[in-house]
Every structure is written in structure tokens, then in C-alpha cells.
Amino acid sequence: MAVIYRRTETGEVKPDLIAIFDYEHAELQAGGKVSTTSRIPVLDVRNADLGFDPLPDDEVTISGQGVFRVIDTFADSSKNTKLHLRKK
């Protein structure tokens, strides 16, 4: 999926980034006996394609999905990073 990545800290823009966008289901506990699930938008990026390590508060525009803010990052051993997003 085509993505425009904007670094909040420096204003640097990485246009035409190719990444995988999906929703991850997370179980939430609200303090009671009944749990609920939530869909978290997730973007998987290759750090080499991005050229820098993604950070929380960066902004991504995803083709056909809208604009999101990075709320958390999870690097893996293959130099990819999973970004948890929040719609702006």
C-alpha cells in the first residue's frame, strides 16, 4: 500500500513508501468480568526503505485510508518495524 511518512521531529517526508497496512485485534480489560476487543490500525515498514527509525508522534498518510499518528513502534529481528496507529 502506498504511504507518505512524515517525521514530526524534523519535518522530513518519505513519499511513496511501500508498506503493509492491516488491523490487529487486541483484547481489552475494562475492570469487569467481560472483556472486549478493539481493532488497532497497524503498519509494517522496512526500516531500510524508510531510511530512519520510526518514532511515536510521526504521521503517515495511507492511500485510501486517511491520515494517522504513530502511537507506538515495535522493532523485530529482521529490521522491520510494526507501527500502531491512531486515526487523526
Image (cartoon, grey):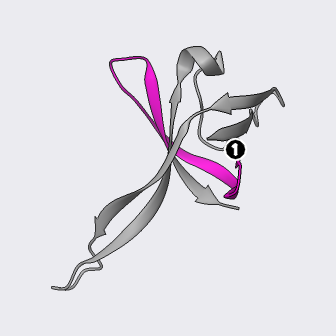
* In the displayed structure image, the side of residue 33 where residue 53 appears, left or right: right
Q: Residue furthest left?
A: 33
Q: Is residue 64 magenta?
A: yes
Type of residue at label 1? Val
* In the displayed structure image, the side of residue 4 where residue 50 appears, left or right: left
Task: Choose between 18 and 32: the one closer to the eye.
Answer: 18
Residue visible at 58% across and 22% down?
53
Check disc 1: other Cα within 10 Å, few if <14, some if 14-19, many if 20+.
Answer: many
Residue visible at 84% across and 31% down?
11
In magenta, the rendered stretch is 61-83
Residue 15, percent across and down?
78, 30
Q: Which residue is the site of mark 1?
A: 60
Residue 19, percent across and down?
57, 35
Q: Quadrant of the N terminus?
A: top right
Residue 58, percent across and down?
68, 40
Which type of secondary structure does the marked residue at label 1 adopt? strand
Task: Choose between 13 and 32: the one closer to the eye.
Answer: 13
Residue visible at 59% across and 41% down?
56
Q: Residue furthest right?
A: 11
Q: Quadrant of the C terminus?
A: bottom right
Task: Choose between 38 and 29: the one closer to the eye.
Answer: 38
Residue visible at 56% across and 52% down?
85
Quadrant position of residue 14: top right
Is residue 31 depicted above or below 50 in this figure?
Answer: below
Residue 68, percent across and down?
67, 53
* In the displayed structure image, the side of residue 28 where residue 87 appears, left or right: right
